[in-house]
Amino acid sequence: MKYKDHASKFCLLRPLKTNRAAEVARCVGIAEGIFGPRCPLQLSQSDNGQKFIANVISDLSAMWPDCKIVHGRPRHPHSQGSAAIRILKICYGLGWTIMEVQIG
């Protein structure tokens, strides 16, 4: 998961053990604790489906009852996958090697 403070441009990378909404919401809570209450989550992007996003929003609403949810327009179709591309660029910039293993 990539969390970016748009005010300071600080970027926090956090590996997820699973791709479940509850874990994503928990990690957003951890990131909010690191950046502090001055920097609440203002912008969220995901390449996952609508049901997954709805579950994350539901979990965040349960964690933060005073949270206000504002929905925006969906991204343009040819910008889909841009979150994954940004993560790959970060990994390559850090000198990490990403390998795909094919089984079978």
Image (spheres, rainbow, N blue to C red):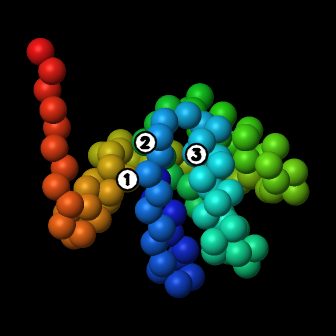
| Badge 3 or badge 1: first in the primary sequence | 3
The kind of residue on which mark 2 rests is Asp
Q: How many marks?
A: 3
Q: Is residue 86 above or below residue 40?
A: above
Q: Residue at x 56, y 82 (%)?
A: 7
C-alpha separation, residue under disc 2 versus residue under disc 3: 13 Å
Q: Are marks 3 and 1 in contact (CB under 8 Å)?
A: no
Farthest residue, direction bottom: 8
The kind of residue on which mark 1 rests is Ala
Farthest residue, direction top: 104
Residue 75 visible, this angle: yes
The kind of residue on which mark 3 rests is Val
Q: Residues within 10 Å of mark 1 (few under 14, many from 20)?
A: some
Q: Which residue is mark 1?
A: 83
Label 2 vs label 3, nearer the camera = 3
Left or right, 84 with respect to 95, comes to right
Q: Which residue is mark 3?
A: 24
Mark 3: which secondary structure? helix
Q: Are marks 1 and 2 in contact (CB under 8 Å)?
A: yes
Q: Residues within 10 Å of mark 2 (few under 14, many from 20)?
A: some
| Badge 1 or badge 2: first in the primary sequence | 2
Left or right, 99 with respect to 66, comes to left
Q: Which residue is mark 2?
A: 47
Which quarter of the picture shows residue 56? Answer: top right
